[in-house]
Image (tube, helix red, strand yellow):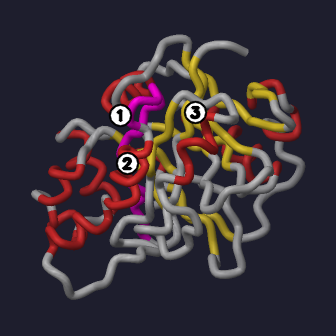
Amino acid sequence: MGAYIYETHLHTSQASKCGRASGCKYVDYFISRGYSGIIVTDHFLSGNTAIPQGLPWKERIDLYAKGYEDAKRASAGTGFNVMFGVEHNFEGDEFLIYGLGKEWYIDNSFIMEMERRQLHDHVRSEGGIMVQAHPFRERVYLPNIKLTDDICDGVEVYNAENSDNMNALAFEYAKKLGVPMTSGSDIHRLHDRKLGGMLFEQEILSVEEYRDAVLKGEGTPVVFDNGKFIRVSDLEEMTVPSAPPSVKVIHF
């Protein structure tokens, strides 16, 4: 495939407690694999964050943005585009928020008190979107799957850290809702395993352009495997579930 490929789900060690690579390390890593850019989506302060509690809000956001800013500096002069996003956690159900910058978060500390629909309404009114990340993820620390059908601006149908069946369930869910589909690696460290990403015919120069493209249903979810990009829709094992979820599914 030609065109432009973007990583949409990425964690750095500066802001995500589970991250094992600093932001700057990802630039050459993704360039070498044929990507055109990345969106840094560290765990926000509601989730598995590396940012200490008890600090003033602005200081916490400044620290949160360090991974993104590190990657942005490393990309200077390369033509590789580094963009800002967040992964916001509720109760194990997480949403990738695109289209809002660091300064917006500094000015909106009250979002930490918002429930799902309140946050979605506010994010949309301010020019952002919320894409549910890995909706059918199952882990030993998650007792159930939580879905909120009416606030999905998109669904991450391929997540490189999930099993094929979990991804296939997400693909089926997105089709049922009729919402845009996205793909991301959910990468926490440098490795040689499969990756995800979004393919576009046009270059994406800002996270606002990415937001607009997703809302229009543009972009193709892809998997990077053995040195090549494959459309998720071409992989039966990732689009047709082989089994139902093994834990309870709760709809909010």
Q: Amino acid at mark 3?
A: Met
3D distance between C-alphas at marks 2 and 1 = 8 Å
Most common SS among magenta residues = strand
What x and y, as percent, mark residue 123?
Answer: 25, 46
Q: Secondary structure at mark 3?
A: strand
Q: Residue at x 43, y 45 (%)?
A: 74
Where does the N terminus fall, quadrant-wise? Answer: top right
Q: Amino acid at mark 2?
A: Gly
Q: In the depicted view, which residue is nearer to us: 81 or 150?
A: 81
Asked whether residue 162 is drawn in magenta, I would say no
* Mark 2 or 1, nearer chain start: 2
Where does the C terminus fall, quadrant-wise? Answer: bottom left
Q: Which of pointers 3 and 1 indicates the residue nearer the eye?
A: 1
Asked whether residue 82 is drawn in magenta, I would say yes
Q: Residue at x 56, y 63 (%)?
A: 21
- Tell me if 216 is positioned left or right of 188 in this view: left
Asked if residue 49 is positioned above or below residue 205 in the image, the reply reads below
- Residue, disc 1: 207
- Residue, disc 2: 85
Q: From which residue to which does the magenta span run?
A: 76-90
Q: Amino acid at mark 1?
A: Val
Mark 3 and mark 1 residues within 8 Å of each other at the beta carbon:
no
Report which quarter residue 63 is drawn in.
bottom left
Asked if residue 50 is positioned above or below residue 98 in the image, the reply reads below
- Residue, disc 3: 181
* Mark 2 or 3, nearer chain start: 2
